[in-house]
Image: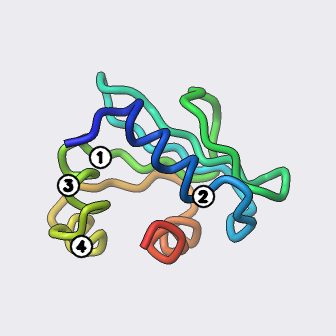
Amino acid sequence: MMDVNELTKAMKEKLEGNSSLSSKVKFNFGDEGIILLDGSGGAIEVSNEDIDADCIVNVSLEDFNQIIEGPLNPQMAFMMGKLKVEGDMGIAMQLSQILG
């Protein structure tokens, strides 16, 4: 299982420079930390800044790893209550295409 630093690095490699997101999304892993995807400037920037976002995804680090690695479907995680979304639900729907 990847920790927040490893996930941040992996997401930077996969997403930085991608412009398919035009807003800010924060993944909140509680005590484990935060990953922020900021596409408001055109290309996505990935960081661990805890700032206001258009959409906040609250999920455990363990469940997020399972979503990234494949065994856990994001929609299923949402329906099971393992993943909670605050803010713009439309942005959350885009995430599966961006992360997928």
Residue at 30% across, 69% down: 74
Q: Which amino acid, mark 3?
A: Lys
Packing grade of label 4 (10 A; few <14, some 14-19, many >=20) is some
Residue placed most toward the observer, 11 or 37: 11
Provide the residue designation for mark 1: 59
Q: Are marks 2 and 1 in contact (CB under 8 Å)?
A: no
Provide the residue designation for mark 2: 15
Q: Tell us which disc is closer to us: 2 or 4.
A: 2
**Image colouring:** rainbow
Quadrant in the picture for residue 83: bottom left
Provide the residue designation for mark 3: 82
First along the sequence among labels 1 and 4: 1
Q: Tell us which disc is closer to us: 1 or 4.
A: 4
Give the spatial CA distance, label 2 vs label 1: 20 Å
Q: Which amino acid, mark 2?
A: Leu
Provide the residue designation for mark 4: 73
Judging from the image, what secondary structure is the residue with disc 4 in?
loop
Q: Which amino acid, mark 4?
A: Asn
